[in-house]
Image (cartoon, rainbow, N blue to C red):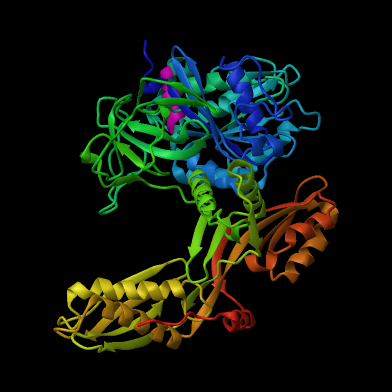
Amino acid sequence: MPITSRDIRNIALAGHPGAGKTTLFEALLQAGGVIQTAGTIERGNTIGDFDAEEIARGHSIQSALATIERPDLRVNLIDTPGYPDFRGPTLAALTAVETVAIVINATAGIEYGTRRLLHYARERGLARVLVINRIDAEDADLAALVDALRAECGPECLPVNLPARGRAKVLDAFFHRDGETDFDSLAGAHARILDQVIEINERMMGRYLDAGEDALTPQELHDAFEQCLREGHLLPICFTSARSGAGVAEFIELAQRLLPSPAEANPPPYRRHRDGARIEVLPDPARHVLADVFKIQHDAFLGKIAVFRVHQGTLRRDAQVFIDDARKPFKVGHLLRLRGKDTQEISAAIPGDIAAVAKVDDIHPEAVLHDSHDEDGIALAPIAMPQPMFALAIEAASKGQEQKLALALGRLAEEDPCFRVEHHKELNETVIRGLGELHLRVTLERLRARFGVEVVQRAPRIAYRETVSRLAEGHFRHKKQTGGAGQFGEVFLRVEPLPRGAGFEFVDAVKGGTIPSQFMPAVEKGVRQGLAQGAIAGYPLEDLRVTVHDGKSHPVDSKEVAFISAGRKAFLDAVLKAEPLLLEPIVNLEVSVPEAHVGDLTGALSARRARILGTGSPRRGEGAISAQAPLAELDGFATELKAATAGQGRYSLELAHYEATPPAVQKKLAATWKPHAEED
């Protein structure tokens, strides 16, 4: 029988650094018959970490794919990076799967990455499974870890299997209730998870209470289990040891018997650009093709490879496919399935399949592939990515390398959704942004190793923003006469603050045609130019509303360029009257240090204007500090932490919000800004 969408399982392995995701990825591929011998990180021969930089560093930088294929099962596995600096590829992979298996190190327990990934998966409406790995470690207290997970995640967090025979084997607790386990009771675990699953269905609950669980069929149990996963009513725990193989084959069986297929999971959130309306997408192989590109990688031989998830229809080799709203299709000359760095030709991809095409220059991350213009103007809702806050100004170290540098940066930005490249024309400067010091350091190393480009770098720039603190009016009349027809445009507008994070609103409140409608886009263009150039320190303005309420025009001299200039200068006039503020990025900071160093590090953070939110001791001998701090104050913190803890401390950060800088900081930054000369 051919594989159908109901036979497919798409699973992303995610988790905190050091949880053992790549090792588990290898063990699953070996148990699934894909490879004969599992590779190891130490030998640098894993399927998942094939990039030279990944092999050298011993951890994942990009996501990697491989497929377990059986007559009645196809499991598409995605191994994702754990470090927060490489969170972009991890989150992009979540748009292609139904299930996120969050891998937890049995000896380390709940870590910051565990919490964040649970949050991202829940927000996306994905099924979540907790995989406790390294269960055979001597210092792993599995019973205590299960209690901690339940305390952290709630009563819906329940083991679906349990270790047995000295953690050499794992016994299913959902379909079975008899057997000796290393801790807890299999019968008790079975009863608890069964009660949790069937309470979601009143009809099943009634039959269970009347006639016992023998009255329920395996299909009914699967359907109820899958519904619980989809609705967040169940967060199952399973156990593995990727090194010994315990629980690995059982995880594949769990995936086949209980995890959702593309035909069962929450529908993908496709929306129409025009009005944001949700579009119904069905995993029907006979409908129009609809697929989403979630990963770009570049290969020395195949060039650009675009990896996509098919959500609807059947994409066949030699098909004609459109990218987004393009009028001209491209031909699918080669349809590929990935296994790490290797590719395999396939003839077709059905709903639920993850496949790839190569050498299509116009394709890009988040592109929608479709074979009919009926699907123009829609896109899959993107997942919320963390903001890249760390920055470096760079330039080619050698003359004549500028074009090569630009090409290399463009490719790296395609591969990593949280790596940004900005070109500041007025400063003739290229700025790269990433999620952390490690992110940018690795990127620069990849520039050198992959593309042969050396760069000169300067100190990171902080992504400050500007805003206004009160309502104010602005006005400007642009009048220019150079012989013959002149230029004329006059704009009256007001600015007012919006809540933090609201962005920018432009309102046309002109009545009586004092500014003809054909010139209003020019006014808005001028205002947006003012937004970009800043008013007090040269940083972009945000969180404000601009309302254009009056103006004047001339039947002969009014031109678009006049209203662009008038809009920009009226806007800046209003901003300077509206008590502008400089905003600085505030980050959530999670620091793990030896317990004896908590006091010293708390004081060090306070000296950096940090607000300490809490301290704790998640494990014996280890202290944790939660804080919020201005990103600008964390320069050099990594070095200080390393020195203070003899290299045992670690931290992660993520943008929390923007807030006003202290007046002294605003004054200092404003004094160093030199606005470029205005040209009429």
Left or right: where 489 falls relative to 79: left
Residue at 34 percent across and 77 percent down: it is 546
Left or right: where 483 falls relative to 543: left
Magenta span includes 658: no
Residue at 59 percent across and 76 percent down: it is 661
State the extent of the magenta-drawn residues as a range: 219-227
Residue at 66 percent across and 20 percent down: it is 38
Residue 652 in sight from this viewpoint: yes
Q: Position of residue 96 (x, y in %)?
A: 44, 36
Quarter of image, res 57: top right
Magenta span includes 222: yes
Task: Identify whether 543 is placed above or below 114.
Answer: below
237, 520: nearer the viewer: 520
Left or right: where 590 falls relative to 575: right
Left or right: where 422 falls relative to 680: right
Image quarter (top left, top right, bottom left or bottom right) of the N terminus: top left
Task: Identify whether 350 is placed above or below 415.
Answer: above
Quarter of image, res 569: bottom left
Q: Position of residue 454 (x, y in %)?
A: 64, 51
Quarter of image, res 23: top right
